[in-house]
Image: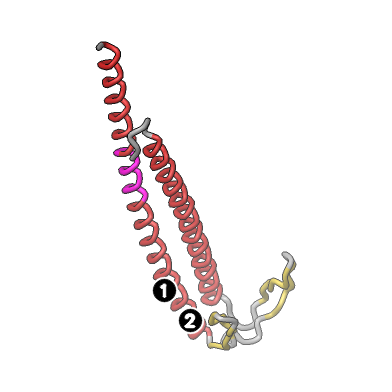
Amino acid sequence: MSLGGGGGGRQQLQELSQQIQALEEEQEELEAEVESLQEEKREIDEAMEALDSIESGATVQVPVGGGAYVRAEVEDIDEVIVDLGADYSAERTREGAISSLETKQDAIDDEIEDVRDEITEVEEESAQLEQQAQQAQQQMMQQQMQQQQAQQQGDDE
């Protein structure tokens, strides 16, 4: 910190403020990631429910893209194509497909937990920086008061 007017204190406060803002933005991004993962998990739930309730011979609506659907008849419910990730898919039985989806949900749960841990770390770091900012502001105010007192004493002499 500088002795000549507290300019260094202001700079430190500005730097801390920028760091806090960056952490807040990171926290928002992480929270959006959690929401996205939760949405993916809801979609998997819906797929598992559909697989449980659909029977061979049932008529279903199949998305073909762009918000368009076609009606189709399920020929064999034990021929389900499941996305495995990394651009790979596999044919599974109904039970195998549900098991694959449950495994995917477990992986998403783990990922959500990891992201929440990151959020906690960011919150803790942000709290520490806010505390440092408060201390720097208090020191700056004390220095200003001391300088004012010194000036008043110099003026009185």
Q: Residue furthest front?
A: 157
First to last magenta residue range: 126-135
Dot 2: what SS?
Answer: helix
Image quadrant of residue 148? top left
Residue type at mark 2 is Ser
**Dominant secondary structure, magenta:** helix
Position above or below: 26 against 95:
above
> Residue 106: which numbered mark, if any?
1
Position above or below: 9 against 102:
above
- At 45% across and 49% down in the image, what residue appears? 24
Residue type at mark 1 is Asp
Along the line of sight, which residue is nearer the eye, 141 or 52?
A: 141
Q: Position of residue 58 (x, y in %)?
A: 64, 78
Q: Which residue is mark 2?
A: 100
Q: Residue furthest top?
A: 156
- At 45% across and 76% down in the image, what residue appears? 102
Dot 1: what SS?
Answer: helix
> Residue 62: which numbered mark, if any?
none
Q: Is residue 118 rendered to the left or right of residue 92? A: left
Along the line of sight, which residue is nearer the eye, 3 or 90?
A: 3
Q: Is residue 23 rendered to the left or right of residue 69? A: left
Q: Position of residue 42 (x, y in %)?
A: 51, 65
Position above or below: 122 against 143:
below
